[in-house]
Amino acid sequence: MEESLEQILELSLTLLMLGGAVCACVFKDLLNAVIAAAFVSLMAAILFYFLQAPDVAMAEASIGAALTTAIFVIAIKKTKRVEEE
Amino acid sequence: MRILISCVLLVILSLGLVFALEQAPFGSNQIDNADKPGRFYLNQGMEKTGAANVVTSVVVTYRGFDTLGEVTILFIAAIGLGAVFHSRKKVKRYEKEKQSASLILQTGCRFLFPLIVLFGTYVFIHGHLSPGGGFQGGVIIASAFLLLFLGCEEKKIPMKSMNTVESLAGIIFVGIGLAGLYWGESFLENFLPRGMDYMLLSGGVIPIIYIAIGFKVGAELAGIVAGLIERNP
């Protein structure tokens, strides 16, 4: 029973990651897409933690979820949006 | 029509992936095979290197040369970004009349900044005992600088001393490797006394290398973020 619970947790985390990745591809607004990508990284960090890899989880959470998102957001803020109809 | 074709291609691709990966033993315990290096690292890593964290013993000692390569890649990326940012004439950061951050935000940033730096330092100093290490600690320190850049923009960060810290950390890393070549047998070999296991001062050169990596990564990433923020469109 305990193992199946863990499996359900891992499966749901993986599904959330997949949903976030699809959202990051589909979203038109770049800011939303970046936030979705950060969500994927965060879920990956939690998944790494449950798979007993805390080192990788820390790296993923700090680099993927925090710093990369900040760099992307700053880059989006500094650049102009050009939409062609 | 295009959507249909892409759907068919996606199905074919996923079926191919499934069939290709069907034979791979996901989730099985491959470490139990006696001749695999993983088993050696798990069983003998602790007593050979003195690092309680097996990941650290692999990253810093057995695969120390790879870590040097990773740090070099990050360094080259930072140099490239700096070249891109410096190509134009530098514009002053406060040219646009911006409303400065509120008192609460500034005070909060100044209060949180040392705590986050302390946490990052803890993570990379204890890299050989607990999860974490130079990269993670360095990134945490860089995120503390990010908070400072975002929260209180008036604060100037001395970029010159940051570059000096980064270069010094790189020199220390390579210097330790060369010292291991001189006093030991190979590059990055441990030449210091091992100390008592599970204590802070143990593992020989591992804590020194991790401190160097932490400073280097933190200074590099903080420099990247500072370059991004200071660059005007």
Image (spheres, helix red, strand yellow):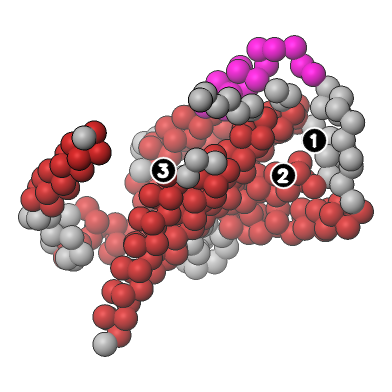
**Amino acid residing under circle 1:** Ile
**Disc assigned to residue B145:** 2
Is disc 2 in contact with disc 1, using a CB cutoff of under 8 Å? yes
Question: Considering only order in the chain, which callout, 1 or 2, is on the residue closer to the N terminus?
Answer: 2
Residue A25 disc label: 3
Residue B125 in magenta? Answer: no
Residue B171 point in image, percent of width and height: 58, 30
Q: Residue at x 64, y 27 (%)?
A: A80
The magenta region covers B76-91
Query: Label 3's element?
Result: helix
Of the 4 image quadrants, the one containing the N terminus of chain B is top left
Q: On the rendered structure, is A8 left or right of B146? A: left
* Residue A24 % position (x, y): 45, 46
Q: Chain of mark 3?
A: A
Q: Residue B139: image x %, image y %?
A: 59, 47
Residue B56 makes an appearance in the image = no
Residue B75 in view in this figure: yes
